[in-house]
Image (cartoon, grey):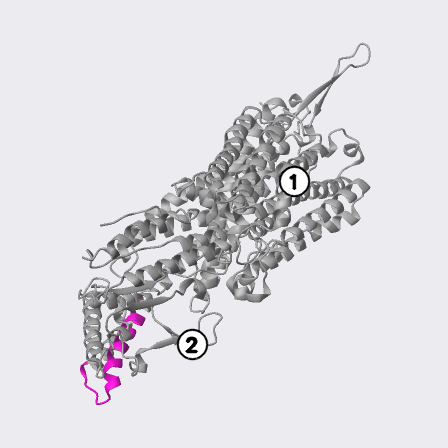
Amino acid sequence: MTFPYDSFNVEDLHTVDEGVIEHLFPLLENPNKPFDFLVGHFLGVDHVGHRVGPDHASMKTKLTQMNDVLKRVVDLLDDDTLLVVLGDHGMDRSGDHGGDGELETSAALWVYSKGPALSQAHIPPPSGLLRYTYFPGTTVRHRSIQQIDILPTISLLLGLPIPYNNLGTVIPELFWRDSKGSELLRALEINTAQIKTYLDTYRSSPSGGELDDSWQSIEAAWAVTKATSLIQDSNFVKFSNFNWVALGACRSMWAQFNPLLMGLGLSVLGIGLLATWSAWYGLKAAKNDWIHWLDAYLGRLLRGMAGGAVVGIVVSLLLSSYISGIDALDYTLFFAPLVSSVIGIISSPPKLSLKALSTTPILIMHTLAFFSNSFTFWEDRIVSFLLVSSIVPSALVGFTAPVSRLRNRILGFSLLFAVCVRIMAISTVCREEQGSNCHVTFYASSTIPSPPLTVLALAIPAALGLPYAMTHFLGISRSDVGVARSFIPLILRPSLFAGATYWIIEWADSAGILGHEWAPLLRIVRTGTARVAFSIAIFGGGFLWWSIPICLDFEAREGEPGKNRQVNVIGYANAFGSPYLIFWGIGLGVVYATTQLTGQIVVSLATIAFLSWLEVVDSVRDVRSIEAQFVNATPSTLLGADASANISSPIRFSDIVPLALLGTHVFFGTGHQSTISSIQWKSAFLVTANLTYPWSAVTVILNSLGPLFLMAFASPLLGLWNRAPVMNITPPTLQEKTRDQDKDAGVEQQLAAPDIQVKGESTLAGVGYMAYYATLLLGSAVSAAILRRHLMVWKVFAPRFMAGVLGVVVADVGVLLGVGVGVERITNRVGRMFGKR
């Protein structure tokens, strides 16, 4: 008989436990004991840990309930019943689990019976069978077993065969019942024979070659079990020793690395990164002819991929009989991107000179630092230093700017950027390896996963104030018009307010501020609030922006008598950047709602920081344009009306680095680390009261990766911000006199489309952003491969590599969505308004 309950709803602390109690005690109270094996799985303690942490008052209440349950169970036991109480895992200091920390992987085991003694108390089992360890916070060593040891032990106690593929060893104390230990010896013999049968079968299977390196030691340990020793303890230990040798062999076999596949993977990553840099330099060199260049470049890449797939199939046919463990799909997945990337690199060679490398010192340091486990431990702190350092060259331009207005803008916005970054760095969650040198500030404490009181006080002001800040930045270029007038007050502000309100209600519910009787109503209210936040941002914001993707207004003035009226276009100076910021605001509303309150403050600061950086980039670009005009232009062109429009400083990779680092910084600031245990499972219950696929998975992903996505999504703004539509006013008829002039006329005609330059610049910014994260991925992958035998590989290097993979995926998705949808929609609409043919 079974009585299932929803076990994944961590917000429900009682239903599962009460259900177990409801069905458990009638069976125990039945004199006939209508069961052979009875399992009751209580989840309340686990849920309390996830929801409010181990130090919350609810934990004491739940533990008291469990203690009362155990008392009743013990009272109802008869002499023939064995009680086994165990946990399937532990929890860290914040109440979560899922990582490999000792607190998370350790749990208690208690075995009790009212019948005859389970073990001889006056004579302990042979010491060679017993293992001890020091658990966290203890000074006395405790008896330790593996969880897999429970399986063969319970099986034999029930009189059942040990499962075929078991690798655990029976717990000696439960079979140590006479002075000679005959029951224990028999149990160990059965246990060892079962494991040897499993290994023999595995050895004869197609995968048996995996045991080649260990088979000699296994056979030697097995031979020892056949020998009889005069020392009694040795007759027990020889069986236990064989089991440990077998377990060690299987662990090494199933945790082994394939150097060939690792080499192929690293080759693809490396060559793919070079191809990304080749695309960056090619786009930059093509300038306003980038569309023709990109069409030809992508065509070559696609043909190379098709050719590489064919090469992969042919190579697999030739080498399949010589190299095992690699099939046709592996070869195809290797050669298709390899050939495609090689063709891309040949057609547009990246500039790998010392001068080019000198422009990316931050990226180089960030990548090489992954070879240090200490850096990976403290990456959240070091990134803030790299981030502030990355804006220093631009800030220094402010001291030499030829115009006081530009000088004040560069220095002022650089200072604002640095202040926001430093305040964001206050928010931290700690890795286990950081120990006492780290103090949790994202939560109220390391054991209470609730927001600090200061954050609770700032949550609503931040949600309401961020739209005002964004309006101010738009107002600098008078582009707070058009769709911005409706989107910010009617879409963004209500969406952010609803997102903050949800988490405040969640805190009130978790803390029991209104009492537990209000919990059902609070659950309904906060679920509805989250749905409102998402609906306003996605449906309301999406419809409004798609209908009117411009932030422009028109002001007509009466001209002098006899002349036409003058029409001023308000917001013209930022015609491309302002509507894209509105588009970005849709993503901001969605991610904001999935982020906990402290993270919302961090996201607000990150928004102000990246807008400040856009103003710095624009001002530095103006300084360089002025300098270029005075260096290269003639007096007549300097006095021309369109002089400033025709000379525009191109985007540089150093402009992209701070935004890319800001993405990593906001990831850490919103309560995340490159560890599984830092996943905020609360976010799975945003839009549903219970665990519901796919929505729970979507909200967890948005909570974890949304901060990275926002910065990738913002990268096209580096090419769009404060860029006005540039129209060529030269009459085309004057340029069509000769064949060469006809070619020039084609270029001029292309320049007449006001969106050509900004589309190219925004695409270039997106490619540069992807290149940054691809470089980090390669660095983390190489470090994990080289240090694969390092003690910290699975705790530090492998998780950081997996985080690097996710970072690249999120960066690519954000850039592609931004360029493919946002930039394309905006430039087409603005282009139609200002002369695109």
User: Quadrant location of the C terminus?
Assistant: top right
Other-residue count near label 1 (Cα within 10 Å), few / some / many at <14 / 14–19 / ≥20:
few
Q: Main secondary structure of the magenta part?
A: helix
Q: Residue furthest top?
A: 562
Give the answer, above or below, for where 292 lies relative to 152.
above
Image height of 626 relative to 807, above or below:
above
Residue 758 x, y percent position in the rendering: 61, 35
- State the CA–CA distance, disc 2 to disc 1: 52 Å
Q: Which residue is mark 2?
A: 141
Which residue range is magenta in the image? Answer: 226-250
Residue 271 seen in this snapshot = no
Q: Residue 482 placed where, x, y %?
A: 64, 25
Residue kind at label 1, given as amino acid type: Pro
Q: Is residue 660 left or right of residue 619?
A: left
Q: Quick check: marks 2 and 1 in contact, CB under 8 Å? A: no
Q: Give whichever of discs 2 and 1 has the lower sequence position.
A: 2
Q: Is residue 601 magenta?
A: no
Q: Is residue 230 magenta?
A: yes
Residue closer to the observer: 130 or 2 = 2
From the viewer's side, name the closer residue of 393 and 480: 480
Q: Position of residue 515 (x, y in %)?
A: 51, 44
Q: 286 or 141, which is in the foreground? A: 141
Closest to the camera, between mark 2 and mark 1, is 2
- Residue type of the residue flagged with mark 2: Arg
> Where is residue 440, by image quadrant?
bottom right
- Residue of label 1: 461
Density class for disc 2 (Cα within 10 Å; few <14, some 14-19, many ≥20) is few
Decide if residue 637 is on the left or right side of residue 341. Answer: right
